[in-house]
Image (spheres, rainbow, N blue to C red):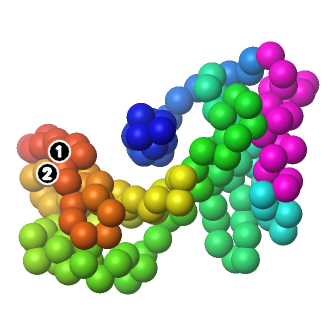
Amino acid sequence: MKQFILSIATLLMLSVSTTAFAGTNDDGINQLAVKSFKKDFSGADNIVWEQRDTYAKATFSLHGQVLYAYYNTNGDLQAVVRNITSDQLPINLLSSVRKDYGNCWISDLFEIVSDDQTSYYVTLEDSEKKIVLKSQGTEFWSEYKKERKALAL
């Protein structure tokens, strides 16, 4: 499960091609996932599906918020993701970011809920580097990825 969550986090930052597989409809979408989604998010609207090799992703609106639901090939809900603002972070995590990375700006921030566990990913940048942190519960951050930016001439 942890590997799946890490895959989702990575895929949110990268673009991957859409593919179809057995058990899908003519549009290539896994119908087990569609059926589960209708049950899990009955009030959803603006639904857009993407099919990948090992999962289906639904982007949708619910109660005025854009969410992303990920389903495995068996149609089981694996994770729900949403973009958030910094004031929606748990106070411990927000304080830590402000204290340790006060010279950086937040360029991306999202929450992943899977198996009743919530994780947060924040991308921080300054003129020289880009850092992605992953929360360990709501107590502290660990470095997920770090890269130096190319210097402009």
Q: Residue at x 35, y 57 (%)?
A: 121
- Residue 146, placed above or below residue 128: above
Percent coordinates x, y for residue 65 in the rendering: 65, 72
Read off the residue under disc 1.
146
Q: Is residue 40 left or right of residue 125?
A: right
Number of residues whose C-alpha sits closer than 10 Å to that of mark 1, classed few (under 14), some (14–19) or many (20 or more): some
Tags 2 and 1 in contact by the CB under 8 Å rule?
A: yes
Number of residues whose C-alpha sits closer than 10 Å to that of mark 2, classed few (under 14), some (14–19) or many (20 or more): few
* Magenta span contains residue 101: no
Q: Residue at x 84, y 25 (%)?
A: 24
Q: Residue at x 38, y 83 (%)?
A: 87
Q: Is residue 126 left or right of residue 85?
A: left
Q: Furthest residue to the top?
A: 22
Percent coordinates x, y for residue 43 in the rendering: 84, 68
Residue stretch in magenta: 22-39
Read off the residue under disc 2.
129
The amino acid sitting under disc 2 is Lys
The amino acid sitting under disc 1 is Lys
Q: Is residue 141 left or right of residue 55?
A: left
Q: Furthest residue to the right?
A: 26
Helix, strand or loop at mark 2: strand
Asked if residue 116 can be seen in this view, the reply is: yes
Mark nearer the N terminus (2 vs 1) = 2
* Magenta span contains residue 24: yes
Percent coordinates x, y for residue 151 in the rendering: 10, 44
